[in-house]
Image: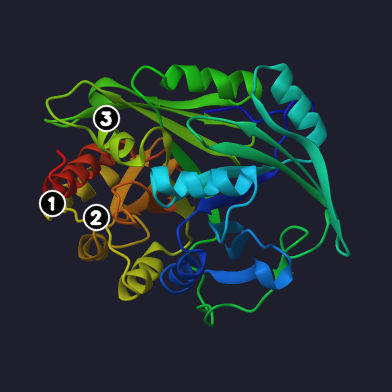
Amino acid sequence: MTETKDAKDAFPVKGMDAVVFAVGNAKQAAHYYSTAFGMRRVAYSGPENGSRETASYVLESGGARFVFTSVIKPATEHGRFLADHVAAHGDGVVDLAIEVPDARAAYAYAVAHGAHGLAEPYELKDEHGTVVLAEIATYGQTRHTLVDRTGYDGPYLPGYDAVQPVVEPPAHRYFQAIDHCVGNVELGRMNEWVTFYNQVMGFTNMKEFVGDDIATEYSALMSKVVADGTLKVKFPLNEPAVGKKKSQIDEYLEFYGGPGVQHIALATNDIVASVRAMRAAGVEFLDTPDSYYDTLGEWVGDTRVPLHQLRELKILADRDEDGYLLQIFTKPVQDRPTVFFEMIERHGSMGFGKGNFKALFEAIEREQALRGNL
């Protein structure tokens, strides 16, 4: 387990600020995540309030924030980058924004320790105060915006107006926070990016999964997890491993057109209610064979959710020395077999479902086979 850092942390973080998606149609994406994921639209930037090039919708659920941006008419380098990103990758994550107490200090530390700076610290101001932002590059075309909003009380950032929800949000939030964000990188580059986070952000290695930990009869991958000292920001990093057939990481890299964010894990305090509601709204989850549940109770033991409900809803369970967790994974949420989501309910365990890897990857392989990509 990673030890919590003290106040002298050279790169302190407050948590995930936002997951920013570049998409083909932000208005429709905002509607989907409002109705299917139960999120509340809280802010908007577009032609109506001065943004002539892009339209962006900000959605929240508890402490989790998603931003969906599409290009109306590219006129600047940033607009062309977003348009090219969607053309190359389809809908995908362009930015894993991290909230920090001091963006200037964080940027200076990161660049001094090897980060490629994309934007030096700059300020945005409006009647709600000032936000300081800076940007560094990570794997593929993904970036980390370092966000210091200690002097700001607006709905998101200057240039965004508060708006009403798309639909009335559900009384029960389907999820309350972003648990972790998973990146897929090319064969042989996982350790390079682990070292990047170790050096550039002072993150430490939390977990490691290699060899038989994370293999099926047909495919394999390797994974390491880096996290800040408080475990508020956790980034698992995957790379493919040699197997008989194409792994899920190989498929992602092929259809995404390179490395990028594979999935976002969303922390929920009631996975049963959330999965029922999301299924009713049309979200598709991976299937799990009944045989998985025949012996589950023998090694997981009692959980908050009875075994018959886990079986009914196809929810996975895992236990380690610290407790247990419940989890389930969606199918890809766009036509390309790329980005998907995980719902996770933790009860002590800070793991990632190691006991479920084989069942999960076999479920993914069944979907790959249906797509003709295994």
Q: Secondary structure at mark 2?
A: loop
Q: Position of residue 272 (x, y in %)?
A: 36, 66
Say above or below: 373 vs 203.
below
Say above or below: 306 vs 223.
below
Front tag of 2 and 1: 2
Q: Tell me which amino acid carries mark 3.
A: Ile
Q: Nearer the viewer, residue 284 or 74?
A: 74
Q: Secondary structure at mark 1?
A: helix
What residue is pinned by disc 3? 214
Residue 245 in which image quadrant: top left
Name the mark on residue 286: 2
Say above or below: 142 vs 239.
below
Q: Position of residue 254 (x, y in %)?
A: 29, 35
What residue is pinned by disc 1? 294
Q: Tell me which amino acid carries mark 1.
A: Asp
* Disc nearer the start of the sequence (1/3): 3
Side (left or right) of 197 relative to 321: right
Residue at (64% x, 36% y) in the render: 230
* Disc nearer the start of the sequence (3/2): 3
